[in-house]
Image (cartoon, helix red, strand yellow):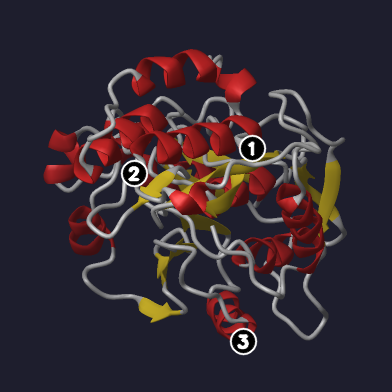
Amino acid sequence: MIVSKRYKTVLALVAVVAFMLLLPAGCVDQPDYGKKPDDPYANFDLLAKTVGERYCFFAEKDIDWNALCSEARRKIKPDTHPYDLFFIMSDLLDNLKDGHVNLVSPFNTSYYKAWWTDYPQDFNMRTLEEYYLDFGGLQTSGMRYVMFVPDSIGYIYYPSFNYEVGAGNLDYVLAILSKSKGLVIDIRDNGGGLLSNVPTLVSRFIDHKVTGGYIRHKTGPGANDFSKQFRYEYSPCGSSQVSYGTERPVAVLTNRSCFSAANDFVAVMKSLPQVEIIGARTGGGGGLPFSSELPNGWGIRFSACPMYAPDGSITEMGIDPSEGCEVHCTPEELAAGKDAILDFALARIASKTKIDN
C-alpha cells in the first residue's frame, strides 16, 4: 500500500506511526549482527524479534508467535544454505496469513496467497469485456466506464488503485455519467495500490465530512501495546468539481481479490447510506505495512499499524457485503457469459429507481 503526499490526514498519522516504529523497544543493547551477516541463526532471530515486536494482528488471529518461532528455529543448522533458510523463514511468515507480509531476497520474494486463492474468483474479465462492454466503453485514469441502457445505469470498472485517479479525469467520467439513474463501481480483482485514491473517489459521493476510519500504532514490543485509535476524515469535493451526489443509488462490486487500499475504499463506501456492497467478502489487508532489513540484506515487510472501518470494526479479515447482497458467480455461468454479481447490481438499482420515479 502506497500513501501519497496528497492524502494529508492519514499521512500525518503515518508520520507519527513511522516515528514510533523507529523508536527502540527498550533501553537494552542490541546484538552486533554486522560481524556475522550471513549467520543463519542471527538472521532468523532478528526476523523473529522484529516481527514479534512490531506485527499488529497476533491477538486477532490467535497466533502464538514464540511457539511458531521455536519450532521453525529447530530446522536451522550452522551451515544451513541461504536458499533453505529463505523457505524456513517464509514458511514461518505464512502463519500470519497476511498478504502484506513479504520476505525479499535477491532470488525470491515470499507472498502469502491463500487469502484469495482458497476462495471463488467470482469474476472473469473476458466475460465482462465480451458480454457487457462489447469490447467498448471509454477509458481514463485506469477506469473503464459506460452507460448501460435502457435503464440508464452508469458503470465504472476500476481494476487497480495503482492507477492514480486525476481529479480532472474523474470530472469527465462523472459528467458523462451524470444523467444515470444509479451507478455501479466494479472493483473486483482490485488488489490495492495508492491509498490517496480512496479520498479522491469518496469525495464525489458525500456532501459533508465523514469518518474514513481509525488507525492505531504500536507503542511497545508486547502483543497488546497499542496507542488509542486516531480518527481520520474524508471531505466532499470542491464546488468546481463534479459530484455524483448522495441521492442516487450506488453499488460497489467486490470479490475476495479486493485487498489493501481497495479494502479501505469498500469500508468507507459501505458506511454511506446510498451505497450497497454487492458480491463477496473482500480479502482484507487492513494494516499499514512496515519494512526492515536483516543482516544479510534481505528485506522484511509486514503489517504494523491496524486500520479500522468507520464503525470501529477491524478490516484485516475483509469487509462483508451489505445485508442481502452476497452474490457469487460460478465458473460455468461466467464461461457462458453471465455475471451474476453485475446482473444482481443492475437489477437492484433498476428496481430502486423505478420505485423512486
Q: Mark 1 highlights which residue?
A: 54
In this rendering, which labeled residue sits more in front, label 1 or label 2?
Answer: 1
Residue at horizontal 72%, vertical 68%? 7
- Left or right: residue 342 versus residue 141 is left
Q: CA distance from mark 1 to mark 2?
A: 19 Å
Q: Amino acid at mark 2?
A: Tyr
Q: Mark 2 highlights which residue?
A: 111
x, y percent for residue 93: 41, 32
**First reached walking from the N terminus: tag 3 or tag 2:** 2
Residue 177 falls in image quadrant: bottom right
Local secondary structure at mark 1: helix
Q: Nearer the viewer, residue 210 or 14?
A: 14
Q: Amino acid at mark 1?
A: Arg
Residue at horizontal 87%, vertical 58%? 209
Q: Mark 3 highlights which residue?
A: 168
x, y percent for residue 280: 43, 33
Q: Amino acid at mark 3?
A: Gly
Say which quadrant the N terminus sits in.
Answer: bottom right
Crowdedness near tag 1: few (<14), some (14–19) or many (≥20) residues, C-alpha within 10 Å:
many
Q: Nearer the viewer, residue 304 or 197?
A: 304
